[in-house]
Image (tube, helix red, strand yellow):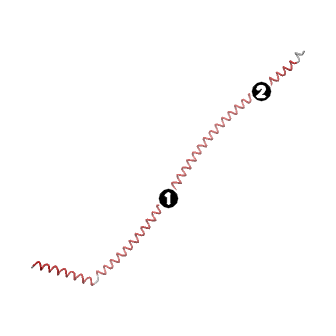
């Protein structure tokens, strides 16, 4: 009877072990399936992260291009403003020179008018007319003397 008594205990222990082993295998399969699902989710998230990284790179490139364009526009505007200021300065300088030349021209015209007036006064002066007549008479007498000398 000793041989038969412990045998049901061993059968129940083996059954318990088999049941525990079946549960462990089932849990292992569930864990393996969970691990696969986690790996798939991880891969999907890695792909999403890569797409986001690529989008971020594109956005950063676009932003850099826009910044460069903005800087180029600012530089062009600054150059244009500097050129406009330089042109205004040159125009002011030319205007000043023009005014100086106009002033000199006015002075010259005034002097010319004064000279013409003085000349007219001198030409109408009776002394000048008398001197002019005497000068002509002297020339005529000189010419006559030369003619007489030549005739002799």
For the point 54% across and 52% down, the residue is 71
Above or below residue 48? Residue 13 is: above
| Residue to which mark 2 is pinned | 24
Badge 2: few (under 14), some or many (20 or more) residues near its Cα, within 10 Å?
Answer: few
| Residue to which mark 1 is pinned | 82
Coordinates of residue 5 in the picture (x, y in percent): 89, 17
Q: Nearer the viewer, residue 104 or 150?
A: 150
> Left or right: where does residue 20 sit relative to residue 114?
right
Dot 2 and dot 1 residues touching (CB under 8 Å): no
Name the element at disc 2.
Answer: helix
For the point 42% across and 70% down, the residue is 100
Question: From the image, which quarter does the N terminus lie in?
Answer: top right
Coordinates of residue 64 in the picture (x, y in percent): 57, 47
Question: From the image, which quarter does the C terminus lie in?
Answer: bottom left
> Left or right: where does residue 139 sit relative to residue 80?
left
For the point 74% across and 30% down, the residue is 31
Coordinates of residue 68 in the picture (x, y in percent): 54, 49
For the point 19% across and 81% down, the residue is 138
Mark 2 and mark 1: span between their CA atoms?
Answer: 84 Å
Q: Nearer the viewer, residue 59 or 147?
A: 147
Name the element at disc 1.
Answer: helix
> Left or right: where does residue 66 sit relative to residue 141?
right
In the displayed orientation, state which residue is furthest to the left.
Answer: 152
């Amino acid at each position: 009877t000793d041989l038969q008594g412990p045998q049901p205990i061993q059968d129940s222990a083996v059954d318990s072990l088999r049941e525990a082993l079946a549960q462990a295998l089932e849990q292992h399969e569930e864990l393996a399936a969970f691990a696969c699902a986690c790996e798939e989710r991880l891969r999907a998230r890695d792909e999403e992260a890569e797409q986001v990284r690529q989008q971020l790179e594109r956005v950063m490139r676009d932003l850099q291009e826009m910044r460069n364009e903005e800087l180029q526009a600012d530089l062009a505007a600054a150059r244009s403003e500097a050129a406009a200021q330089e042109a205004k300065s040159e125009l002011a300088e030319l205007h000043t020179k023009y005014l100086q030349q106009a002033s000199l021209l006015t002075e010259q015209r005034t002097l010319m008018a004064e000279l013409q007036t003085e000349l007219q006064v001198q030409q109408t002066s009776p002394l000048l007319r008398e001197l002019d007549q005497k000068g002509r008479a002297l020339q005529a007498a000189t010419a006559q003397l030369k003619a007489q000398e030549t005739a002799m």
